[in-house]
Image (cartoon, helix red, strand yellow):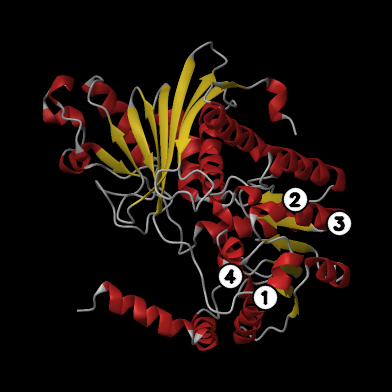
Amino acid sequence: MQNRRDFLKMGIVGSAFLPTFANLIAKAEQKDSVGQGKAREINIGIVGFGTMGKILSGYLARCEGVRVRCVCDIWKFQVKQAEHVFKAYKQEINTYLDFREMLAAEAKNIEAMIVSTPDWLHCEQVCACLRRQLHVYCAAPMAETLEKSAEMCRVAKASGKLLQIGYLRRSSPTYQLAFKHVIPEMLGHLTFAQAESRRPMSPMFMCKGPPKQDVLSRFGYENAEQYLNWRWFRKYGPGLALSFLASQADLFCQAWGVPPHSVTAVGGHDSYRPSRENLDSLSSIFEFKLPDGVTAHATHHFATASARTRRCFEEFNGIRAMLHLSDHGFWPKMNGPANYVRRTANLPVEEYANKWSTFVEKGWILPSEVDREYKTIFETECGASDLRDDASFICPLNVKRNGKTDVMLHLENFLAAIRGEVTLNAPADRVFASMVAAFGAIRSAARRETVYFKPGDFTP
């Protein structure tokens, strides 16, 4: 049996053979593609070949109807990796160390750009691409300030080009089912929501052979430590707290169909200080004023914690049921499946018998343990007060992914929108409200006071 240390050693050794490994993947997945069927070719460039850049590149390299023409990164090591990866897929790319040089040389040869650089560079790079009449896919969050996020929306509108933000949940079949059917039709009146994001505690990342200091200074970094760990330094934005909060606040806005009315938040440096400047914990309470005059609330918690805890989840509570969602379904499950509806036990048995079974028939959920044991709840011959609200009433969401991840589906949506076949799932102007909410929470924690929003705040 291998222990964790042996496993990590194998991973380190295996990384040295990246080209060979990528070649094996290319052969194994030669017939697999992100797109479906033949379509006109789209030429794409990529700026930023870090973790997310590699993930997106892996899908684009085997995507039918897509040709990656150029890749840019300020670190020569990353550029060499890009060359090896695309060579394994039998594709030749032009590589650059300076984004401006790549844009000047390649803008006429490409139709879209993937921006997967640090948040503080998004606004400049996205706007430059839009002004050169390129469609843009930008990794989330939008930018390190609210003003720059608004500028990105305005430039996208003026250019007439597409700007997709990397809110992967908006293309996830799980979340689409949840917001189309489960929340409006199954939960009943939505009373409360909560979300949580945890980041495993880890030391600052360093490596042998980082970019030379003159390169780092040229591109705005004081030293290699800040370049490799930019999320923890205030000059590069609010960091992880913004990333997690913005994407999950977007879910709150979708659930109630309105932006928040106010937010009260507290945060701190609970794990690392003084080496890390940005918040490593942030707890927020959002208040929503609904059109019918009812007030609803949602809470969000971000923290660095043990790697063995739950990573990221959301729960929406209604008078009829509770919905649990998690975009990390590949992590070990806690308390059953990653995405499910848990029925309450305080409603008449007849409602379960006559209505809940129709949700199963429509294919939204799978039967619970009770449903599988009895054709209807009514046949148990017990009253509502006798039903226990435990794991036996969990109904997993019935979602078929066909082997596609949320990243793959989000890219599919972006490419199909470029071809004019669909509309974007996460256009910048529609997700801007979540950035307002997230920055409001960060501002509330800093000032130790409630932040109230005005309707005009949500217009870029």
Amino acid beneath label 1: Lys
Marker disc for residue 123: 2
Foreground mark, 1 or 2, reads 1
Residue bearing the label numbered 3:
133
Return the residue nearer the eye: 40 or 454.
Answer: 454
Residue bearing the label numbered 4:
54
Sequence-wise, which precedes: disc 2 or disc 3?
2
Sequence-wise, which precedes: disc 2 or disc 4?
4
Residue 74 shown left or right of residue 264 in the figure: right
The x and y percentages for residue 36 are 61, 66
Sequence-wise, which precedes: disc 4 or disc 3?
4
Question: How far is disc 4 from disc 1 in space, using C-alphas?
Answer: 22 Å
Reply above or below: 33 against 451.
below
Sequence-wise, which precedes: disc 3 or disc 1?
3
Residue bearing the label numbered 1:
212
Tell me, yes or no, if residue 346 can be seen here. yes
Do the residues under discs 2 and 4 have CB atoms within 8 angstroms? no
Residue 93 falls in image quadrant = bottom right
